[in-house]
């Protein structure tokens, strides 16, 4: 069996649903793309800086920040306070979905937190030596409440987080889903390494989740 087939058949939920219920989840920053074809913009040129969607998942004894988005320390601190009443030092863990710079632009602000990425992402980023600390390879179930699942297509190593909140299945997709418009057409962003694989990943997420938090947009219902 090829690696692709293994990924395509791997279950998205492996732990018992009750074990995955988190206390609260909040969008800290709603992301945007540098260019958006659904706004009539060409894929060939960046028209603005990209900011990714950054999500806080609060659970039993942890505050997990997914894709720390803002490179400015004061700006990141302000958004975290505004959206969740937390300080930078309150974040106990950070997870990075993939190796693109906008998805870890603010990671250095969280020097007290554990830094995680799925093993292939950690390997890529650690080899660049761009970060002051190494990312630890995340286990399949992170912090006892969040599942780390391969969602290839945008990049080969891309991983998303799945968890339950309010009885619903939620995926913090990262760039496996760019925005709601891209999702509706099962279209990947222009820089995807494998658009067909990305479309398959989106189809799997549509079956597995009730709510999608995309990489560069507000969350939406499936
Ligand atoms: Zn990306």
Image (cartoon, rainbow, N blue to C red):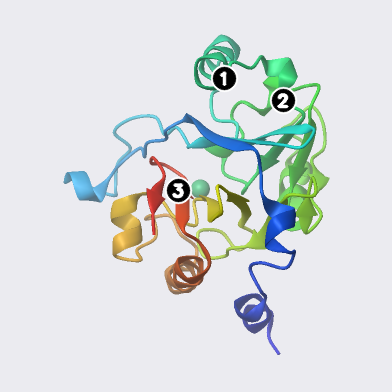
Nearest the viewer among 70 and 155 is 70
Find the distance from the CA under tag 3 to the CA under tag 2.
Answer: 21 Å
- Residue 218, compared with residue 181, is above or below; it is above
- Mark 3 closeness class: few <14, some 14–19, many ≥20 residues within 10 Å: many
111 is higher (above) or lower (below) than 160: above
Residue position marked by numbered label 1 in the rendering: 80
Could you tell me which secondary element the residue under label 1 belongs to? Answer: helix
Front-most of 19 and 149? 19
The image shows residue 171 at horizontal and vertical percentages of: 54, 54
Disc 3/disc 1 C-alpha distance (Å): 19 Å
* Residue closest to the far left: 40
Residue at point 35%, 59% (across, down)? 183
> If you read the primary sequence from the N terminus, does the residue marked by circle 3 or circle 2 appear first?
2
The answer to which of marks 1 and 2 sits earlier in the sequence is 1
Secondary structure found at label 2? loop
Image coordinates of residue 139 in percent, x first then y, are 81, 55
Q: Residues within 10 Å of mark 1 (few under 14, many from 20)?
A: many
Residue at the spot of label 3: 214
Quarter holding residue 101: top right
Query: On residue 210, which mark appears?
Result: none
Q: Residue at x 29, y 48 (%)?
A: 44
Task: Decide which of tag 3 and tag 1 comes sooner along the chain.
Answer: 1
Q: Could you tell whether 133 is left or right of 50 in the image?
A: right
Residue linked to disc 2: 91
The local crowd at label 2, few if under 14, some if 14 to 19, many if 20 or more residues have their Cα within 10 Å, is many
Q: Are marks 1 and 2 in contact (CB under 8 Å)?
A: yes
Residue at the location (45% across, 67% down)?
A: 206
**Picture coordinates of residue 116 (x, y %)?**
76, 42
Residue 73 visible here: yes
Mark 3 near ligand 1 (CB under 8 Å)? no
């Amino acid at each position: 069996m090829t690696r692709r087939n293994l990924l395509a058949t791997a279950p998205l939920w492996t732990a018992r649903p009750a074990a995955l219920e988190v206390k609260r989840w909040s969008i800290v920053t709603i992301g945007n793309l540098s260019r958006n074809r659904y706004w009539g913009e060409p894929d060939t040129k960046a028209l603005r800086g990209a900011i990714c969607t950054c999500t806080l998942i609060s659970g039993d004894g942890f505050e997990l920040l997914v894709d720390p988005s803002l490179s400015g320390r004061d700006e990141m601190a302000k958004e975290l306070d505004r959206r969740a009443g937390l300080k930078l030092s309150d974040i106990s863990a950070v997870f990075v979905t993939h190796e693109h710079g906008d998805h870890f632009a603010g990671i250095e602000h969280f020097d007290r937190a554990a830094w995680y990425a799925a093993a292939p992402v950690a390997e890529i980023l650690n080899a660049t030596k761009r970060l002051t600390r190494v990312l630890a390879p995340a286990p399949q179930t992170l912090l006892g409440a969040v599942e780390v699942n391969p969602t290839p297509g945008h990049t080969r190593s891309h991983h998303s987080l799945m968890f339950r909140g309010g009885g619903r299945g939620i995926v913090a997709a990262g760039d496996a889903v760019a925005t709601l418009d891209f999702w509706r057409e099962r279209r990947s962003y222009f820089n995807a390494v494998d658009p067909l694989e990305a479309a398959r990943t989106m189809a799997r997420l549509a079956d597995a989740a009730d709510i999608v938090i995309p990489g560069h947009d507000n969350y939406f219902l499936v």
